[in-house]
Amino acid sequence: MVPAGRSARPGEFEAIARWFAPLAEREPGALGLTDDAAVLAPAPGNAFVLTVDMLVAGVHFLPDDPPDLVARKLLRVNLSDLAAMGAVPRAYFLAVALPRDVDAAWFDAFAAGLAADQREFGVTLAGGDTTGTPGPLTLSLTALGELPVDTAVRRSGAHAGDEIYVSGTIGDAALALEAIAGRAAVPDAAARDHLIGRYRLPTPRTTLGPALRGLASAMIDVSDGLLADLGHICETSSVAAEVDFAAVPLSPAAAALLAADPALAGIVVSGGDDYELLFTAPPAARAAIAALAARTGVPATRIGAIAAGQGVTLRDAAGRALTPARAGWQHF
């Protein structure tokens, strides 16, 4: 019997036909999800860019987060990776490991979330896999994007003298987790809603990223934390970085929390889950970047500079080095 208030759990092939096949209708190469693989080709002169990310209940999202928002976050964190290389999203492949309490209502909401973001970002399902698990809900998504051959913006292109930029604002998602755990006092309900909304539903910069091809010398998205991800650029580019904490862009909600508790500064630059673009560019690109930010409606803030050497140094308004307890999130 199905417990009161719950809808029956569908079988594997019913789930594919009922919820996932309609999400693949816009991609002919998906073959209606009736074959073992998709058949895709890039446009002439283009190359594919592929990325994969996993979300695990209790690790990357809260177990009681709404299924539609979980689906959208899963897709968006992958689209953010594509944006960080300058690629335009095209399709994705979805793999889900479902515990026994997942029912038809969960599928309804999860598929609706994917459908909403497919419309927003012009991407479509092209294949995947489903299985059961005795463990937590585990979701994996592989996203596929396109860009002209040899134009990908990589982490390894930063040079001494380049300037460091970040899109949007930093720290909201990490501060949301602090608030949920009771470690940060959010001033009002509107600020709390903003922070939690940024944690549950990040905004991949899919317009800004491709537009930065030819301007940015190196780029990454901020998933593990501003300092940690800038460290990846420095390591692969064999350079050092200096960041001015006072220049790091904050939302009004984050700024209010830091004003009340300056000790949260370390969380802002190391907490992660921002999914903003962190990139470097030569000083000659300033005007073009400002114009691009105005055209796309996505702020791009200069927060520091690249120098010769190694590592990332964070400085306060007086020029003193700040040392957060950790640089960023480590998965294991």
Image (cartoon, grey):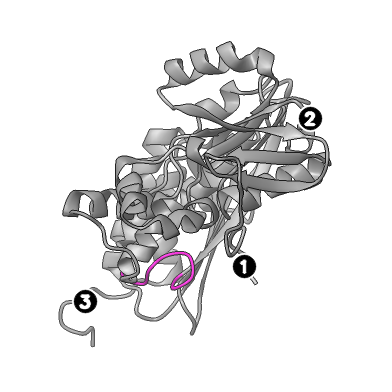
> Do labels 1 and 3 touch, CB within 8 Å?
no
Give the prevailing secondary structure in the magenta stretch.
loop
**Image-based side of 173 in relation to 210, left or right:** left
Q: Which residue is mark 3?
A: 6
Quarter of the figure with the N terminus? bottom left
- Report the residue marked by disc 2: 160
- Mark 1 or mark 3: which is in front? 1
The answer to whether 4 is drawn above or below residue 288 in the figure is below
Name the amino acid type tagged 1: His
The residue stretch that appears in magenta: 57-64
Q: Where's residue 154, x and y in %?
A: 73, 36
Between residues 154 and 33, which one lies in front from this camera angle? 154
Q: Residue furthest bottom?
A: 1
Decide which of tag 2 and tag 3 comes sooner along the chain. 3
- Circle 3 SS class: loop
10 Å neighbourhood of mark 2: few (<14), some, or many (≥20)? some
Q: Amino acid at mark 2?
A: Ala
**Quadrant of the rendered image containing residue 249:** top left
State the image coordinates of residue 312 (x, y, percent, origin top left): 70, 47
Q: Amino acid at mark 3?
A: Arg
- In the figure, is residue 44 to the left or right of 210? right
In the displayed structure, 144 sits above or below 150; it is below
Q: Is residue 221 visible?
A: yes
Q: Is residue 112 visible?
A: no
Marks 2, 3: nearer the viewer: 2
